[in-house]
Image (cartoon, helix red, strand yellow):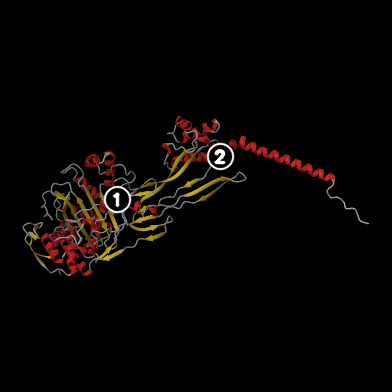
C-alpha cells in the first residue's frame, strides 16, 4: 500500500511567502521613491554640502623648470614656487551669511591689502564663477600665505572658511640680475625660453606637469590619486660668473668713461668681449653692451642705458618703422630686440687686420710661403686696375713675414695672398670656418655664407682686400674659433657654453665633451704663428694690450665700416684678439668696439686697453701665473684714453 506524499508548500506557507513578497515590494518602492525624491528635490542641496566640505579637488601639479648654473655651481637662473589665490565665488555664495562673513574677515586679516568691499564686489560680479583670481594676490611667496594656511589647518579657527584655495606655479628668477644676460636668456609665458641657454636648452630645462585627482569613495571618505610632476634638468654652463663680472665691469666702465664724448650717448654703439679656453672651445665669459635685467627684460631703463640712449635709438628706428605703419609698436619691439641681441653671436662685421694671422697661416700651410720671405712695402700695391694703399702710405720698406704681421702691413699681405691664389685662399677660409656656422649652442647664429667671396666670384681685387680682413663679414664667435685653432696646434673645437646636464637629483645625465670639428693647420704652422703673434704684442702694434709679467700673443684690427655699400667715413670697428701665455695658451680674449665715442676712432688702442684691463684681473683669478720678469721693455704702451698726450698708433 503506497504512502500518501506530504505537500511541502502548504497553503499556510504560500500565504506567508506572498505576504513577505508584498512587504518587500512595498519597501523597495518606498526606498526607490525616497532616492528619486532626494535626487530631484534635495540632490542639489546635498551636493553643495559635499562640495563645500571637500578640501581638495583635481588639479595640475606644475613641474619645476631646471636651474642654470655657472661652472662653479653658482645659480644663474632658478625657479621659485609661488602661489595664486583663487576664490570659488559660486560655493562661497551658497554658504550661510555667517560663513561668508568669516571667510571675508579671515582674508582681510591675513591679507591687509584686500578689503571687504573688494571681496563683496567679486562675489557679486562673479557670482557663478568657481575660478576668480584677485589681481593683487598672484605670485605670492609661501611666507605671504603662511598665516592663512595655518588658520585653515586649525579645525576650530578654519571652521566655516570655505571657497578659497591657492594655485601653485613656479616663477623664473635670476639671482644676479643682468649678469651674463646674453648667454642665459629669459623665459616668457611661464616656461618658454627666449634668447640664450633658456632658449637653446628649453626642452632639457622643462619637465612634465603632474596631476592630483580628488574624489569621494563609497563610504563618503576622501580619496586621491597623485601623478607626480617630473621636474626639468639642470644646465651647468661653462661660464665662470666671477670672470663674467670682471668683463662686464670693464665694459661698463669704458662706455661710461666715453659717454657723450663726441656724440650723445654711450661710449660705443656696441662692445663685445669673449673669453674662451682655446684647448676645449669652452666659453668662460661672453658679454656685450648694453645689458638688460633678466628679471624684467621688457624694461629698457636699466643701468647703462640712459633716456638719451633710448631717444637716439627710437629716433633712428622710428623712421624705419613709420614706413610700415604702427610705428610706435615697431619701435618698441625693435628697441627691445636690439638690446636682447647677443652681439658676440648674432652680429657681423669686417674683421680687419685680425684676419691677417689666417692669411699667413694659409700661406705657410699650403706651401705658398716658407716664412723666410722678405717683402718690400712701398705704401701701395697695384692690383688689376686699382691701387690699394698700405696703412703706412710712406711704406714700411723691407719686411720679413713676422714684421709684416707685427706692423700690420697691408702691402705685404696682398703680396702673400697673390702667391696663395684664390683657390687655396677661399679653401682655407672655409677650413677656418669663415662663412660657416660654428654651431655654438646659442640661438640665432647667422648664416654668413653670402657675406664672403667664393672661388667662383672672387676677383684679384677681392683677394687683395680679403687678405687684410676687409670686404667680407664674420661674427665674433667665428673669428674666435678660427684664432683658437691657430694658437692651439691647429685644432678647431666647437665653441660651447654648456658643460653638462644634470638630473633634478643632481646626477650627471650628459657631459658636453670638447668636440673637435677638424684640423685647420699643422702643429708646426701653429708654432710659427704663435711666435709671430707674440712679436705683435711684445714689439708691434699691440703693445698697449700687454699685461706686465705675462707673455702674450695677439693681433689688432681696425676696419672702416660699410653702410649702404659705401665706406662710412671716420666710423670704425676696433678689435684685439690675443692669448696668454704666448707659447702655450691657456686662455684667449677677443674684444670688439663698434664705433667708439671718441674723436679719433682709427686705431685699436681702445680695444687693446680694454683687453689688458680685463686680463689683469682674470689671469690671477684663473691661477695663470706670470712667466716673464717685469722690465721696462715689456711694459704696455700708454692708452690714449688714459693719456691724451700719448702718441697715436698708426692706422691699420
Give the residue number, with chain letter if any, for mark 1. 182
User: Which residue is drawn at the image coordinates 55% and 35% (left, top)?
Assistant: 160
1 vs 2, front mark: 2
Residue extending farthest front: 1
Can you tell which quarter of the image residue 432 is in? bottom left
Q: What element carries label 2?
A: helix
- State the quadrant of the C terminus: bottom left
Q: Can residue 442 be seen in this view?
A: yes
Can you tell which quarter of the image residue 334 is in? top left
How far apart are the alpha carbons under marks 1 and 2? 50 Å
Residue 634: image location, x then y, percent: 16, 60
Quick one: 268 or 376, which is closer to the camera?
A: 376
Residue 579: image location, x then y, percent: 22, 60
Residue extending farthest top: 117
Residue 629: image location, x then y, percent: 18, 62
Q: In this view, does 605 lie above or below 20?
A: below
Q: Is mark 1 on a helix, strand or loop?
A: helix
Are there few (<14), some (14-19), or many (20+) residues within 10 Å of tag 2? few
Give the number of marks. 2
- State the quadrant of the N terminus: bottom right
Give the residue number, with chain letter if any, for mark 2. 51
Amino acid at each position: 500500500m503506497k504512502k500518501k506524499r506530504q505537500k511541502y508548500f502548504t497553503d499556510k506557507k504560500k500565504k506567508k511567502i506572498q505576504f513577505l513578497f508584498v512587504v518587500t515590494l512595498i519597501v523597495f518602492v518606498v526606498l526607490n521613491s525616497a532616492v528619486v525624491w532626494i535626487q530631484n528635490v534635495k540632490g542639489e542641496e546635498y551636493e553643495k554640502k559635499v562640495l563645500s566640505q571637500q578640501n581638495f579637488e583635481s588639479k595640475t601639479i606644475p613641474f619645476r623648470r631646471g636651474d642654470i648654473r655657472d661652472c662653479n655651481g653658482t645659480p644663474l637662473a632658478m625657479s621659485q614656487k609661488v602661489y595664486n589665490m583663487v576664490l570659488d565665488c559660486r560655493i562661497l555664495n551658497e554658504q550661510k551669511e555667517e560663513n561668508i562673513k568669516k571667510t571675508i574677515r579671515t582674508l582681510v586679516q591675513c591679507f591687509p591689502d584686500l578689503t571687504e568691499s573688494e571681496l563683496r564686489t567679486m562675489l557679486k560680479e562673479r557670482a557663478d564663477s568657481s575660478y576668480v583670481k584677485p589681481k593683487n594676490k598672484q605670485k605670492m611667496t609661501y611666507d605671504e600665505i603662511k598665516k592663512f594656511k595655518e588658520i585653515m589647518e586649525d579645525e576650530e579657527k578654519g571652521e566655516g572658511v570655505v571657497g578659497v584655495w591657492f594655485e601653485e606655479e613656479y616663477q623664473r628668477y635670476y639671482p644676479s640680475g643682468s649678469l651674463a644676460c646674453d648667454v642665459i636668456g629669459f623665459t616668457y609665458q611661464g616656461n618658454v625660453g627666449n634668447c640664450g641657454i633658456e632658449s637653446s636648452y628649453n626642452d632639457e630645462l622643462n619637465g612634465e606637469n603632474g596631476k592630483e585627482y580628488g574624489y569621494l569613495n563609497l563610504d563618503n571618505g576622501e580619496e586621491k590619486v597623485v601623478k607626480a610632476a617630473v621636474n626639468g634638468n639642470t644646465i651647468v654652463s661653462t661660464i665662470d660668473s666671477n670672470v663674467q663680472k670682471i668683463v662686464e665691469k670693464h665694459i661698463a666702465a669704458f662706455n661710461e668713461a666715453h659717454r657723450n664724448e663726441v656724440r650723445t650717448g654711450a661710449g660705443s654703439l656696441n662692445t663685445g668681449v669673449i673669453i674662451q679656453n682655446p684647448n676645449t672651445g669652452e666659453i668662460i665669459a661672453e658679454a656685450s653692451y648694453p645689458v638688460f635685467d633678466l628679471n624684467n627684460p621688457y624694461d629698457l631703463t636699466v643701468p647703462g642705458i640712459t633716456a638719451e640712449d633710448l631717444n637716439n635709438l627710437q629716433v633712428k628706428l622710428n623712421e624705419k618703422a613709420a614706413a610700415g605703419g604702427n610705428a610706435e609698436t615697431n619701435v618698441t619691439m625693435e628697441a627691445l630686440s636690439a638690446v636682447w641681441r647677443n652681439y658676440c653671436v648674432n652680429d657681423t662685421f669686417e674683421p680687419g687686420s685680425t684676419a691677417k694671422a689666417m692669411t699667413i697661416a694659409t700661406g705657410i700651410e699650403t706651401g705658398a710661403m716658407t716664412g723666410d720671405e722678405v717683402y718690400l712695402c712701398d705704401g701701395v700695391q697695384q692690383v688689376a686696375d686699382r691701387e690699394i694703399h698700405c696703412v703706412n702710405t710712406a711704406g714700411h720698406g723691407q719686411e720679413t713675414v713676422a714684421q709684416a704681421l707685427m706692423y700690420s702691413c697691408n702691402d705685404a699681405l696682398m703680396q702673400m695672398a697673390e702667391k696663395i691664389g684664390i683657390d687655396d685662399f677661399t679653401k682655407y677660409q672655409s677650413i677656418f670656418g669663415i662663412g660657416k656656422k660654428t654651431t655654438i649652442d646659442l640661438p640665432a647664429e647667422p648664416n654668413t655664407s653670402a657675406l664672403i667671396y667664393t672661388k667662383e666670384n672672387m676677383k684679384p681685387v677681392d683677394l687683395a682686400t680679403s687678405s687684410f680682413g676687409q670686404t667680407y663679414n664674420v661674427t665674433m664667435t667665428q673669428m674666435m674659433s678660427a684664432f683658437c685653432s691657430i694658437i692651439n696646434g691647429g685644432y678647431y673645437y666647437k665653441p660651447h657654453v654648456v658643460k653638462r646636464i644634470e638630473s633634478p637629483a643632481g646626477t650627471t645625465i650628459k657631459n658636453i665633451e670638447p668636440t673637435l670639428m677638424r684640423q685647420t693647420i699643422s702643429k708646426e704652422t701653429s708654432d710659427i704663428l704663435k711666435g709671430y703673434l707674440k712679436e705683435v704684442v711684445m714689439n708691434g702694434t699691440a703693445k698697449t694690450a700687454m699685461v706686465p709679467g705675462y707673455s702674450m700673443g695677439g693681433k689688432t684690427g681696425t676696419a672702416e665700416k660699410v653702410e649702404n655699400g659705401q665706406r662710412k667715413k671716420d666710423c670704425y670697428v676696433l678689435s684685439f684678439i690675443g692669448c696668454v701665455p704666448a707659447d702655450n695658451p691657456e686662455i684667449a680674449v677677443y674684444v670688439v668696439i663698434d664705433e667708439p665715442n671718441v674723436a679719433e676712432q682709427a686705431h685699436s688702442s681702445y680695444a687693446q686697453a680694454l683687453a689688458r684691463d680685463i686680463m689683469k684681473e682674470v689671469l690671477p683669478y684663473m691661477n695663470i701665473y706670470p712667466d716673464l720678469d717685469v722690465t721696462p721693455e715689456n711694459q704696455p704702451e700708454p692708452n690714449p684714453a688714459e693719456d691724451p698726450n700719448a702718441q697715436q698708433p698708426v692706422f691699420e
